[in-house]
Amino acid sequence: MTTQTPATRRVLVAKPRGYCAGVDRAVQAVEKALDQYGAPIYVRKQIVHNTHVVRTLEERGAIFVEETEEVPEGAIVVFSAHGVAPAVHEEAAQRSLRTIDATCPLVTKVHNEAKRFAAKDYDILLIGHEGHEEVEGTAGEAPDHIQLVDGLDGVQQVGVRDPKRVVWLSQTTLSVDETNETVTRLRERFPNLIDPPSDDICYATQNRQVAVKEIAAQSELVIVVGSTNSSNSKRLVEVALDAGAKASYLVDDASFVEDGWLDGVTTVGVTSGASVPEELVAAVLARLAGSGYDAVEEVESVPESVQFALPHELRRDLRAG
Ligand code: 2E6
Ligand code: F3S
């Protein structure tokens, strides 16, 4: 008679995961503004799309508002990492607000591309998710020249003035594979479509997708830590499913992990979006260890070492102070 030993339950943790350079810079900008100027510091929109980050900063004295009109005259307001339209800068100046712009430099790069192509009178097809703050900010740079293409379904709705003068740009946090498909379809309609001068989907989005693909191919279940309004985190769930995971879920923290998800699962993959503090991943690993998944292996797919300097307004005052 042969006895079967149960397969070892294990966890594969993707690397890179979690904070990107733009999120680290934006969160630090609020923290350092609180240290330098004292509470309250106003922040327009969620500084990054993570409920835990927002709550922690609120506990330290940050006040999150939807629009600059909610900020008292003369107060300090931080603009979120997702960027703002020029009209928002103008409103803030009219209200004499002191602004700290925590827009990720890689979002600013896309704004600059939009301005440059609009100045040359190109039609710009901006691939992105309708209603997302980043897309609203980028489109606000040149509303007369930019049309939103929200995935494959948006391709047929686009109309351009001159098919020889059309460029596509994108939101920074899209699925690389889905965007390639959208571009292929756009190019079928507009064969002279120009590519962005460099990738708009940022390094952090791309690397986290490469890393989740690697663990998803070996896992029955992939848990992605991230908030429900985080575009890049949601894309990791889709990419994991496409890469072969039987199931994948987005969780804000360990308390959302359900026992039923683990039925019959030997290997669990774990990763996190670019706006997610590492302590939330550690808590998910502890939760899984409590269910017998205590063999943990980190799978590094791409080395990452990008860092950004703090916003210049803050650096100036930190130097002076
Ligand atoms: C700014 C730009 C891109 O929803 P999304 O993925 O865009 O945002 P976060 O805050 O979850 O991720 C970081 C980020 C900030 N990505
Ligand atoms: Fe910037 Fe990309 Fe992070 S655009 S905020 S580096 S996800």
Image (cartoon, rainbow, N blue to C red):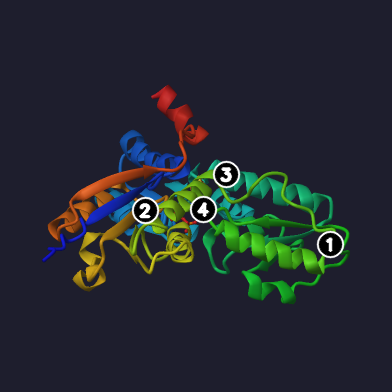
> Tag 2, which secondary structure?
strand
Picture quadrant of residue 136: bottom right
Which sits in the foreground, 108 or 100? 108
Q: On the picture, is 116 further left or further right than 321?
A: right
Q: Residues under labels 4 and 2: Cα distance? A: 18 Å
Q: Amino acid at mark 3?
A: Leu
Q: Closer to the N terminus: mark 4 or mark 1? A: 4
Q: Closer to the N terminus: mark 4 or mark 2? A: 4
Q: Amino acid at mark 1?
A: Pro
Q: Closer to the N terminus: mark 3 or mark 4? A: 4
Q: Amino acid at mark 4?
A: His
Q: Residue drawn at (15%, 60%), measured in percent from left and top? A: 5
The numbered mark at residue 272 is: 2
Which sits in the foreground, 210 or 114? 210
Q: Residues under labels 3 and 4: Cα distance? A: 10 Å
Q: Is the CB of the residue bearing disc 3 within 8 angstroms of ligand 2?
A: yes
Q: Position of residue 120 (x, y in %)?
A: 84, 50
Q: Closer to the N terminus: mark 3 or mark 1? A: 3
Q: Position of residue 14 (x, y in %)?
A: 37, 48
Q: Amino acid at mark 2?
A: Ser
Q: Residues within 10 Å of mark 3 (few under 14, many from 20)?
A: many
Q: Closer to the N terminus: mark 3 or mark 2? A: 3
Q: Residues under labels 1 and 2: Cα distance? A: 37 Å
For disc 3, the marked residue is 106
Q: Is the CB of the residue bearing disc 4 within 8 angstroms of ligand 1?
A: yes
> Tag 3, which secondary structure?
helix
Q: Closer to the N terminus: mark 1 or mark 2? A: 1
| Of marks 3 and 1, the one in the foreground | 1
Q: On the picture, is 11 further left or further right than 212?
A: left
